[in-house]
Amino acid sequence: MDTPSTPSTQPIQEQQLQQPSSETTKPIKPPPIIIYQVRDYDTIFNYLNTKLAHNYKITLQNNGDLKLNVDTADHYRTASKMLTEAQFKWSTYENKQTRPIWVVKKLHSTCSPEQIVQELRQKGYHILEAVNILKWKTKEPLPIFILTFDRTENIQKNL
């Protein structure tokens, strides 16, 4: 006679409670490279294949530019060096996972950026710089500051 299976009353093993190890985390992918004013796709394709050996993905943008994605930082450095040497027009941006954190704060325009940095450091923040925003035409200081923090900083705390 079969008995219905019941949930186990044994304690949960300690191994099941552990967080995933750092080995399972994915490596940070580099940002895409945008190649402008492409006249001949085959030229770029063949040129990239000489060094990257198909370790990339190219996507056509709406405006005719190409977006080049690579998997590793080494391929990124190789691709950017190759594009510069071949004098292609290209650009990229800072990687979101490694760039500093920017916070916009409304403060009086006469506040000294050095004093803001000093006071935040005394409170335990890892601030890199404080910059006062200027009016576009008159270059008068506005009551807005951009505070730049280290990427590891927990900015959820009250500033």
Image (cartoon, helix red, strand yellow):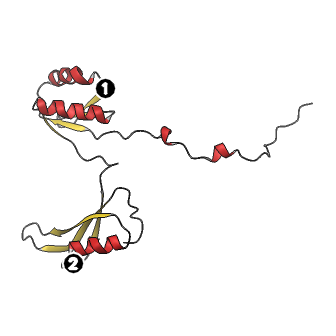
Foreground of the two, 60 or 116:
116
Q: Amino acid at mark 1?
A: Asn
Label 1: element kind: loop
Q: Check residue 37 in the rendering and tell me which mark sits there, or answer none.
A: none
Q: In this rendering, does residue 145 appear at all?
A: yes
Q: Position of residue 75 (x, y in %)?
A: 28, 31
Q: Check residue 111 in the rendering and tell me which mark sits there, or answer none.
A: 2
Q: Earlier in the sequence, mark 2 or mark 1?
A: 1
Q: Check residue 55 in the rendering and tell me which mark sits there, or answer none.
A: 1
Within the image, what quadrant is residue 104 found in? Answer: bottom left
Q: Residue at x 38, y 56 (%)?
A: 152
Q: In this rendering, does residue 106 appear at all?
A: no
Residue at the extreme right:
1
Q: Residue at x 85, y 37 (%)?
A: 4
Q: Mark 2 and 1 residues: CB-CB less than 8 Å, in contact?
A: no
Q: Amino acid at mark 2?
A: Cys
Within the image, what quadrant is residue 38 found in? Answer: top left
Q: Residue at x 55, y 43 (%)?
A: 20
Which quadrant of the figure contains the N terminus? top right
Q: Position of residue 134 (x, y in %)?
A: 14, 69
Q: Position of residue 17 (x, y in %)?
A: 63, 47
Which quadrant of the figure contains the C terminus? bottom left
